[in-house]
Image (spheres, rainbow, N blue to C red):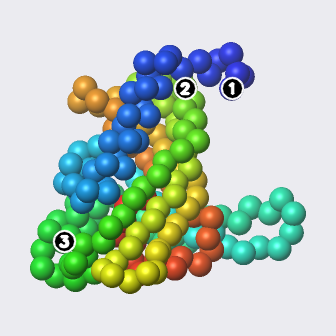
Amino acid sequence: MSHLQNKVSPEIQSEIINLYYQEAYYLDNRKYKEWLELLTDDIKYRMPLRETVEGVGVDDISVDSSFFEETKISLRTRVNRLYTKSAWVENPATRQRHFITNIYIESTDEDTIYKVRSYFLFKRSRGSTTDIEEMFGERHDTIRWEQNQWKIATRAVYPDQSVITTMNMSMFL
């Protein structure tokens, strides 16, 4: 798609960027049920493995292995569990921040669908420890206008780390 064909109106840009900031706010404040409402019912949400591969120009994203592959149903199950006493990993609750930047929005052939690339930095601390967990990388999303709002229809999370050092992945990247 040429530069001239990728015109996205300032209004659409603002609305989609606000969606990302709203998402980060919900996640950082443990409003997971509200966060689920930002996702389409048919969402495909995945984080493929990054492999350490030698060689210049080698694609190091695994095509057949993932850290997770979720649907709205499986995400809802995970969210509902966080509201129970069996979510011991979140007791006491972690302090977390999602930083979203370098948001690039691409138009598609449909006025109601956009492709979005963004970078993320996630930081989390637990209890009174001095250890800070972090994860960073890039996300590729499809955003779709549905039920009078923009929603995330697909997300692929590409961590820059090949070894994930966080205790768990309940942070929803």
Residue 101 in which image quadrant = top right
Mark 2 Cα-neighbour bin, 10 Å: few <14, some 14–19, many ≥20: some
Residues marked 2 and 3 touching at CB (< 8 Å)? no
Residue sitting at x 58%, y 35%: 104
Instruction: Residue 64 in the image: state x and y as whole percent.
Output: 58, 69
Cα gap from disc 2 to disc 3, whole angstroms:
36 Å
Q: Which residue is mark 2?
A: 107
Taking 148 as reference, is 70 above or below it?
below
Instruction: Residue 7 in the image: state x and y as whole percent.
Output: 59, 18
Instruction: Residue 37 in the image: state x and y as whole percent.
Output: 23, 45
Taking 158 as reference, is 165 above or below it?
below
Q: Which residue is mark 3?
A: 81
Sequence-wise first label, 1 or 3: 1
SS at mark 1?
Answer: loop
Q: Which residue is mark 1?
A: 1
Q: Is residue 72 visible?
A: no
Taking 82 as reference, is 10 above or below it?
above
Residue sitting at x 58%, y 58%: 137
Residues marked 1 and 2 touching at CB (< 8 Å)? yes
In the rendered image, which quarter contains the N terminus?
top right
Q: Amino acid at mark 2?
A: Ser
**Closer to the camera, 44 or 21?**
21
Disc 1 versus disc 3: nearer the observer: 3
Residue sitting at x 22%, y 64%: 79
Taking 118 as reference, is 93 above or below it?
below
Left or right of 169 on screen, residue 101: right
Sequence-wise first label, 1 or 2: 1
Mark 1 Cα-neighbour bin, 10 Å: few <14, some 14–19, many ≥20: few
Q: Amino acid at mark 3?
A: Arg
